[in-house]
Image (tube, helix red, strand yellow):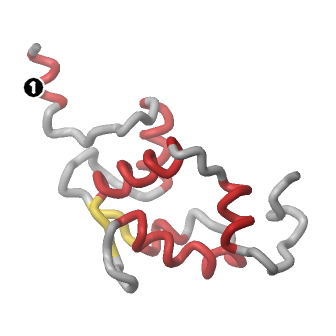
C-alpha cells in the first residue's frame, strides 16, 4: 500500500514495460517521471533520421493531441498516445509505407514485404 502512494505521482506507463518506458523517457529527454513533464518537438524529431523528419513532424502534434505547430507536448499524453498507436498494431514499416505512398524511400528505410 505504501508503495502505491509513492507511485501515484508517477506517469502511467500505459502498457510499456519498465525498460521500454525508461528507454522512451531517455530518448525523449524527459528528466523526471512527472505528470507535468513536457517533451519538446526538438527531442522528438531528434529520434528520427534527418530524411524522415518531414514525414513525422505532424505525427508529434497528433500524438500530443495538440495543434500543428506545437513546440511541446505533455509527457503523459505522449506516452498514452504512443502506447495506443503500438497496441493498435502499427509498426514502423507500416507507418512509413502509409506516409510515403508513392515516394521512393532509401533501401534502409523501405518497408519490408
x 46%, y 67%: residue: 43
Pinpoint residue 86: horizontal percent, then vertical percent: 53, 46
- 73 to 77, vertically: above or below: below
x 35%, y 64%: residue: 39
Instruction: Give the class, few, some or many, for how many residues have Cα within 10 Å of label 1's Cα (few <14, many ≥20).
Output: few
- 85 to 87, vertically: above or below: below
Pinpoint residue 110: horizontal percent, then vertical percent: 83, 63
Left or right of 16, for residue 48? right
Q: Which residue is mark 1?
A: 5
The secondary element bearing badge 1 is classed as helix
Quadrant in the picture for residue 15: top left
Q: Quadrant of the N terminus?
A: top left
Pinpoint residue 59: horizontal percent, then vertical percent: 50, 70
Quadrant in the picture for residue 100: bottom right
Q: Residue furthest top?
A: 1
- 52 to 28, vertically: above or below: below
Left or right of 91, for residue 15? left
- 9 to 77, vertically: above or below: above
x 70%, y 57%: residue: 94
x 83%, y 73%: residue: 105
Give the number of callouts.
1
Amino acid at each position: 500500500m505504501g508503495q502505491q502512494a509513492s507511485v501515484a505521482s508517477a506517469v502511467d506507463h500505459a502498457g510499456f514495460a519498465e525498460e521500454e518506458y525508461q528507454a522512451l523517457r531517455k530518448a525523449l529527454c524527459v528528466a523526471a517521471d512527472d505528470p507535468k513533464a513536457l517533451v519538446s518537438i526538438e527531442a522528438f524529431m531528434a529520434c528520427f533520421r534527418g530524411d524522415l523528419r518531414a514525414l513525422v513532424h505532424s505525427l508529434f502534434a497528433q500524438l500530443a493531441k495538440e495543434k500543428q505547430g506545437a513546440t511541446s507536448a505533455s509527457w503523459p499524453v505522449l506516452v498514452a498516445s504512443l502506447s495506443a498507436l503500438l497496441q493498435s498494431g502499427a509498426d514502423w514499416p507500416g507507418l512509413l509505407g502509409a506516409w510515403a505512398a508513392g515516394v521512393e524511400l532509401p533501401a534502409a528505410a523501405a518497408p519490408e514485404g
